[in-house]
Image: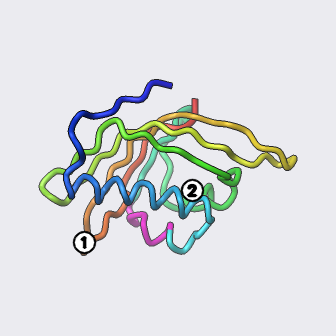
Amino acid sequence: MTHIESAEPLSPEQQGLWDRVQELWRLLQQRDIAAIKAAIHPQYIGWEAGSLLPHDRDFALKAAETDPKIVDFHLFPMSVEVYDRIVGVAHYTFEAEVATPKGKSEKVSGRWTEIYLKKDNVWLMISVQGGSK
């Protein structure tokens, strides 16, 4: 997988958005469904690679509960942008180790684009697109 490293450091706004992206992965790893629900906007719509149709917040929350458990992960930012201090877009690649139903682990990788809205000084996920390769 190719990783692009920006020559310029992230601004404080960009870093705050990137911190939120990483936090959501940690919440997924911990399966903290209540915190994940609070982090996803009620009108969220996402589209996972390979799916015929977009999905809603309820589907995303169910996937957070039932997808293979994340053992370890590494995220690589490709582009992190904040627009007018209220909209954020993060493009990144990931590598993760997930537990299989048979008690073994499997390495997965892929990419995501995540879109956020800042409300009451908190980044809420409003959309995603991407998934595993």
> Would you place residue 33 above or below residue 114 in this image?
below
Q: Considering the numbered disc 1 on the image, is that residue within a helix, a strand or a loop?
A: loop
Write the start and end of the magenta stretch as one range.
36-43
Q: Disc 1 versus disc 2: distance between alpha carbons?
A: 26 Å
Residue 109 point in image, percent of width and height: 57, 34
Image coordinates of residue 15 in percent, x first then y, are 28, 55
- Give the residue at mark 1: 121
The residue lying toward the viewer, choosing from 51 and 17, is: 17
Using residue 115 as the reference point, say whether residue 38 is left or right of it.
right
Q: Secondary structure at mark 2?
A: helix
The crowd level at tag 1 (other Cα within 10 Å; few <14, some 14-19, many 20+) is few
Left or right of 40: which side holds 73?
Answer: right
In the picture, the disc for residue 59 is: 2
Left/right placement of residue 88 relative to residue 97 reads left
Q: Is residue 55 a member of the stretch shown in magenta?
A: no
Q: Is residue 22 above or below residue 40?
A: above
Q: Residue furthest right?
A: 102
Q: Which image quarter: residue 124?
A: bottom left
User: Measuring 28% from the left and 44% from the top, which residue is drawn there?
Assistant: 80
User: Looking at numbered disc 2 in the image, what kind of residue is underneath it?
Assistant: Phe
Question: Comparing marks 1 and 2, which lies closer to the viewer?
Answer: 1
Residue at the spot 75% in from the left edge and 49% down from the top edge? 99
The residue type indicated by label 1 comes to Asn
**Nearer the N terminus, badge 1 or badge 2?**
2
Question: Residue 119: which quarter of the image?
Answer: bottom left
Left or right: residue 86 compared with residue 1: left
Task: Say if mark 1 contacts mark 2, CB within 8 Å.
Answer: no
